[in-house]
Amino acid sequence: MKTLIIIPAYNEELTIGSVVTLARKYGDVLVVDDGSKDRTSEIARESGAVVIRHEVNGGKGKALRTGFEYAFSNGYDFVVTIDADGQHDPDEIPALLEPLLRGEADLVIGSRFLNGAKKNIPLYRRLGLWVLNFTTNMNLGDGLKITDSQSGFRAMNRKVLGEILRVNSEGYKVESDMLVHLSEKGFRIREVSIDVRYDVPNKHKKNPVRHGFEVLAGLIGLIGYKRPLLLFGVLSLVSFIIAAGLAYWGLSPYYRGERVYLTQLIGAGIFVVIGIQLFVAGLMLNVLARMVRRE
C-alpha cells in the first residue's frame, strides 16, 4: 500500500528539513513549495522529499490541490497532509493511518481537542477555534460533530482523494470546505488525538485574527447557500432584538410622564421592517435551495 505525505510549505527553511526527515519513515514525501523566498525547496530536496514549486504564492488550498493531483496521478493508496512549521509530530502519522488500514474510516483528522490535548493550546486560539468549529459543524450533516475542523494533520484513502479533487477551495478554509463536501457525500470521518507544539518559529505567517475572519466569512457564506433560512432567521432575530431595545429606550420616558424619544422609535420601526424582510428572504431562498438540491 503506497502512502504519500504531502507538506504544503511557505518560507519554512527552519523546520522543513526535520519534518521531511521524520515523515519519510512512514511513506514517500512531497513538499509543495508555495512560492517561498527562502531555501525551503533546497532543504526539502536535500532531506529526501520530492519538491513541486509554485513560482507565486497561491495559498494553502492551491498547494494542497497540487499535492492531491500528484498523489492521484501516481497511484497512491493513502495520503497524509501535515504542516511544515513543526507543530505536528510526524511520528503520530501511524495513529492517523490506523483507522484507514482497518477500514473504519475514509478520512481521519488529528484533533487537538481530544483526551485533554487542548490544555496546551493558547486561550485566544481556543476561542477562535471554537467559533470556527461551531460554524463548520453547522454545515455538516447526519449529526457529525468535528472537534478540530481546522487541523491540517489528516489522512485519507484513495476514494476521498478522488472526491477532494472536485472541491475548488482556496486559502486556509480548505480544511472546512473539505469536511463539508465529504460529509455531504457520506464519507466516514473520524478523529484521533494528537499533540501540537506552539513554540515553533514562523508560527504566524498570517495574522491569526485576519485568518480567522477570512475562514469564518467563507463558512457563513456557505451557511447562507446551504441553510439560508437558518442564517437569515438568525439575522432577522438580531434585528428584532435591536428593534425591541430601541423601542424600550424610546418609550421609557413616557412612563415617567415625559416625552418619548421619537428618533429611537423610528429606528425601532426601521429594524422591524429589516427583520421582516430578512425572514421573508430566508424563506424564499430556502425554497430555492431545496429546488436546486432536488434537481
Image (cartoon, rainbow, N blue to C red):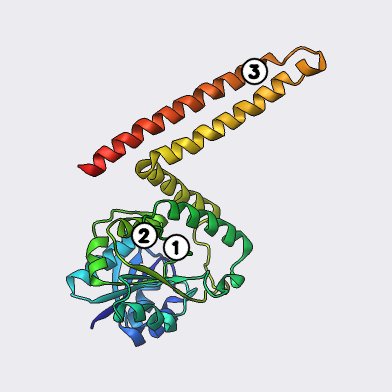
Q: Is residue 172 visible?
A: yes
* Residue 124 vertical placement versus 245 (above, below): below
Image position of 252 with respect to 34: above or below: above
Asked if residue 122 lies left or right of residue 9, the reply is: right
According to the image, label 1 marks what residue?
146
Residue at the image point whose x is 43% and y is 67% from the top: 11
Label 3 belongs to which residue?
265
Tag 2 near tag 1, CB within 8 Å: yes
The front one of 260 and 25 is: 260
The spot of residue 265 in percent (x, y) is 64, 18
Q: Secondary structure at mark 2?
A: helix
Q: Nearer the viewer, mark 2 or mark 1?
A: 1
Q: Position of residue 218 (x, y in %)?
A: 41, 48
For image coordinates 49% across by 61% down, the residue present is 205
Relative depth, front residue between 166 and 288: 288
Looking at the image, can residue 58 be seen? no
Q: Amino acid at mark 1?
A: Ile
Mark 2 or mark 1: name the one nearer the start of the chain: 1
147 vs 29, left or right, is: right
Structural distance between the alpha carbons of marks 2 and 1: 9 Å
**Mark number for residue 179?**
2
